[in-house]
Structure formats: C-alpha cells, structure tokens
Image: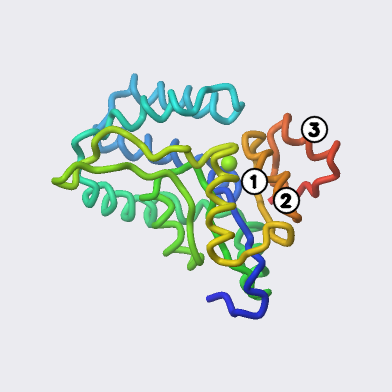
C-alpha cells in the first residue's frame, strides 16, 4: 500500500504492452477461442483489430462498438468472474520484469499507483487486485435492470485524449498533481497523456512514439 509520504504524485501505467509484454485482448481472444465462444474467423478479426489498434490506425469507437456488441445480453457479474479467473491463469504472469520493478519503486516512494488503460473494467479490476494498485481508470459497460450488458460503452472512451480527461478528473478529486506525476506507455495513441504529465516514460515504443519521444526528449525504457 502507498504511504502518504508524497500523496500528490501518481504513477499512471498503461496495461497492454506496457505492464504486460503483450496485448491482453489477444489473450482474451485466445481464451474465448479455446472455450469456443468465438470462431476461428472471429479470432482472426480480433487479431486484425489489435494490429490496427497498435498502429493507431483505427477509429477506436468503431472497434469498441464491434467488440461490445458481441457481449450484449451477457450478465456483468458473469463476465467479471470469468475475467478474474482468466487474468489469474493467462495474464498475470505476462508482467514485464521492468514493470514489476517500476511498481515496486513507485510504491516505495509513496506514489499512487494507477492503471490507465483502454482495456475493460473487468480486466482492470483484476489487474488492480493482482498487483495491489491503488486505483484504475478504464472502459466500462452499462447494464440493463437485470444486470446484463446493453451493448453500449461509457464515453469518452478511456483512450487517447479520453485518458487525459479521465486522469485529470481523477487527479483533481484527489489533489494529485499531474505536473509531478508519471505516465508509462508503449503507444503513440497515448501521446496526449504523455504531454500532460511532468514525467513521461516511454516503454519499448512503437515507431511513431519512438520518433516523438526522441524529438521531445522523453526517456525511453526497454522493459
Ligand atoms: Mg499499450
């Protein structure tokens, strides 16, 4: 648990290819393929979407509409339980060694540890509990009065500029200063948030982010 030694500094972490050495949605798709919840063809589509996402080439809302539609009618609590079991079995061990070290280091300094991810709230909650983070900001899905996903998602999406909006609101409610806070990510889509924090950290970046980081003098780490 974070001490209150420096209560106004947060360390924000992206999940996919930052804390993890791969994309959690690929691992989820493999899980669904094994459980025959999706066909091989649907699995192929997920891989294509992931590749486009990683290259920052897709309209994220279109991708989300496509993905969330698949879960319309599912019980929120069932997805929560399934995701938790999947995370423990298939995901947690994918943490990068450098990430585990950074979490330890920031915790030791008394910083608030916050997951800031475009992944689902199901996955983000599992990550928070597994790695004992202080909080998470992620994407979540409204339910009907029977607790079933209605096929929509909360906007703005926790992605690109939406991450900045979420982080600003979170920080102002908690008297956290973004100018002295950290953000770790691998993706060019996270450039808006990297520009907002005082301590941007670029992790094994994609080529576009690598270029931007060199131009702006952002530290590049290989985890
Ligand atoms: Mg990422």
Label whose residue precedes the other's in the sequence (2 or 3):
2
Question: Quick check: 12 left or right of 151?
Answer: right
Tag shown at residue 201 = 2
Q: Does the CB distance between marks 1 and 2 fall below 8 Å?
A: yes
SS for dot 2: strand
Does the Cβ of the disc 1 residue fall within 8 Å of ligand 1?
Answer: yes
Tag shown at residue 185 = 1
Please name the residue shown 45% across and 57% down the image: 127
SS for dot 1: strand
Density class for disc 3 (Cα within 10 Å; few <14, some 14-19, many ≥20) is few
Label whose residue precedes the other's in the sequence (1 or 3):
1
Please name the residue shown 28% across and 33% down the image: 151
Label whose residue precedes the other's in the sequence (1 or 2):
1
Instruction: Using the image, determine if residue 14 lies above or below residue 58.
Output: below
Q: Does the CB distance between marks 2 and 3 fall below 8 Å?
A: no
Please tell me in which quarter of the rendered image ligand 1 is found: top right
């Amino acid at each position: 648990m974070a001490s209150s030694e420096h209560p106004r500094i947060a360390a924000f972490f992206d999940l996919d290819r930052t804390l993890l050495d791969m994309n959690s949605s690929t691992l989820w798709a493999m899980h669904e393929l094994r459980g025959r919840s999706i066909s091989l063809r649907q699995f192929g589509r997920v891989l294509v979407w992931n590749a486009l996402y990683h290259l920052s080439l897709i309209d994220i809302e279109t991708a989300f509409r496509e993905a969330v539609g698949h879960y319309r009618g599912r019980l929120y609590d069932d997805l929560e339980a399934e995701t938790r079991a999947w995370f423990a079995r298939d995901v947690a061990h994918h943490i990068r060694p450098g990430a585990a070290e950074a979490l330890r280091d920031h915790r030791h300094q008394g910083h608030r540890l916050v997951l800031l991810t475009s992944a689902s709230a199901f996955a983000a909650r599992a990550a928070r509990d597994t790695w004992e983070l202080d909080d998470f900001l992620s994407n979540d899905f409204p339910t009907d009065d029977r607790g079933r996903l209605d096929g929509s998602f909360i906007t703005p999406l926790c992605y690109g500029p939406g991450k900045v909006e979420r982080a600003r609101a979170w920080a102002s409610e908690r008297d956290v200063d973004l100018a002295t806070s950290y953000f770790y990510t691998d993706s060019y889509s996270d450039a808006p948030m990297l520009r907002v924090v005082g301590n941007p950290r670029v992790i094994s970046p994609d080529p576009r982010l690598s270029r931007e980081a060199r131009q702006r003098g952002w530290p590049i780490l290989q985890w």
